[in-house]
Amino acid sequence: MMRKFSLALIFNVALSLILLSFMVYLFEVQFTYYLVLFAFCIIISVKSYEYQSKWIAEEKAFFMLTDFLLQTITLFKHHPKLYSTLIESKQVTSDHLLKDIETWIYKMEEGYDLDRSANDFILKYPHFCVGNLVHMMKAAEVYGNQNTESGFNIIQDDIEDWVEDTYLFKQNQIQQRNRILILCGFSLVIALVSQNMIRQSSDIIATPLYQLSLFIFMALLLLTLLMAQKQLSRAWIEESELVWKQAS
Amino acid sequence: MEASILRAIALLVWMALDKQILVLVEKIAENDLDGLFKIMRIKDQKAWLSKRYSVVKSARYLWILSPFIPSVLLDVLVLLLTIILYKQKYYWLKQKAIQKRLLMRYQFPIYLRQLQVLLQNNTVLTSFQLSISQAPMSMKEDIQTMVDHLCLHPNQLEEYMTFLEYYHLPEIQRAMKWMYRYQYSGALHSYHHFNRMIVATSKWLRQERSFQKSKHLLVSQWWGLVPLLAVSLVFMSAMMQIMMNLFERR
């Protein structure tokens, strides 16, 4: 896994550096500025890769958590026993979530009461849907399954809405990132065309002022690319919805 | 010289009248200040006002510079600084209160949802009591106060209506009226009513969520302007270089 990660990162950095070198060649940027841009480009490519990896990990964790919650509701409605529900629904999980569910199950096996066994899980996943579901399951287990059907339906609807809204927002974020990338491309084309036009009437490309402006232009483009990528690294679960985290 | 003496007299008079001015400051305070104090949970309002005045007071010491800057400019500067310092603390408080109000708009439907889940197998009062440990931090104190009052007068509409009223959010008032009616008529008779409340809360929750998310998108979309500004910079520097070359040739 680590090897795959390193290879992908090296490939990404190399591709970015090739593109940068090509741009530098087209714009005839001085070597000193090229070296600075080269260093910038390495840092920005590594950071971008990091943001992209974070996006993938967050996406996976988000869908796994919501799948687990929905699966739990379905199973619990059918057979309202928390222990057996957790045993069955943990099959749709992996990584950290699986470990946390196993800890929860282990605590139940050790004889902890329902509140104490679920407490760690709620604190680790403090979203209000998780809290509501755990509370509802505890109530159904302690007081019986009567009148809880509609409660589970509410939570199920909330989770569906949550998934839908988050996914839509993430799609919008990708669209916005792509728009920014297109604008970067346009600005490169405009700068290149204007440089070629000016070259025919006057030789200004080698002048220090123009070289400095080219350097700032390219550095700003790299920074914009980084910021566009950075917005994708935002958490998939909105901080303001983590009610228990704030309360703890 | 005369101006400096006049300023020194004004400074001394101002210093002598500090207590009276503080009383005046308390009287002319902004209308919405009480509401802001409640939202920000500032208990000692007098201390806040006196702190506000002590910041404003610092502007007058600019008059000490009078022998070095003998012009009306100094008086204007003192006046402007006094106004800015006077208003600055209020605007800062207001800004914080607006942020808290926005957070409340987002977190109240979440809390209401918790209540609705608890209402499945509890009464309204028990649901409120059970919700305290799970409620968002910003509401805990108010819920506790309301529960204490409801234990004494469970059927008083007023106890429901005063809950978080200082936020002036009609949605909260509406939700509390729902809770009151639910408590009054009981679960069996308000099935339809309860379902309506659930649907409305879902709608509200989604609206707040999309508002919050669109705010993030709005902030990040400004980055799209940077490439255009950068290319303008390149173009301008090229034009400047051409003009300089032209002047050098002449």
Image (cartoon, coloured by chain):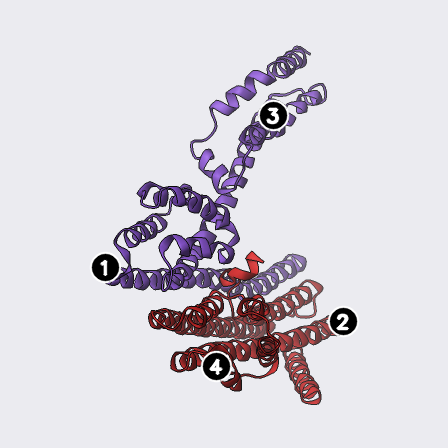
Chain in red on the image: A
Which numbered disc covers residue A85? 4
What's the chain of the residue with tag 2? A
Which numbered disc covers residue B78? 3
Q: Secondary structure at mark 2?
A: helix
For marks 3 and 4, give the CA distance. 71 Å
Residue at the spot of label 2: A32
Q: Same subunit under labels 3 and 1?
A: yes
Query: In the image, which is nearer the foreground, mark 1 or mark 2?
Result: 1
Q: Residue A233: horizontal and vertical position, in percent?
A: 57, 71
Amino acid bearing label 1: His
Which of B89/B207 is in front?
B207
Query: In the image, which is nearer the foreground, mark 4 or mark 2?
Result: 4
Callout 2: few (<14), some (14-19), or many (20+) C-alpha neighbours within 10 Å?
few
Kindly indicate whether the residue at mark 4 contacts the one at mark 1 (C-beta within 8 angstroms).
no
Instruction: Name the tint of chain B in the rendering.
Output: purple
Q: Residue B127: horizontal and vertical position, in percent?
A: 41, 56
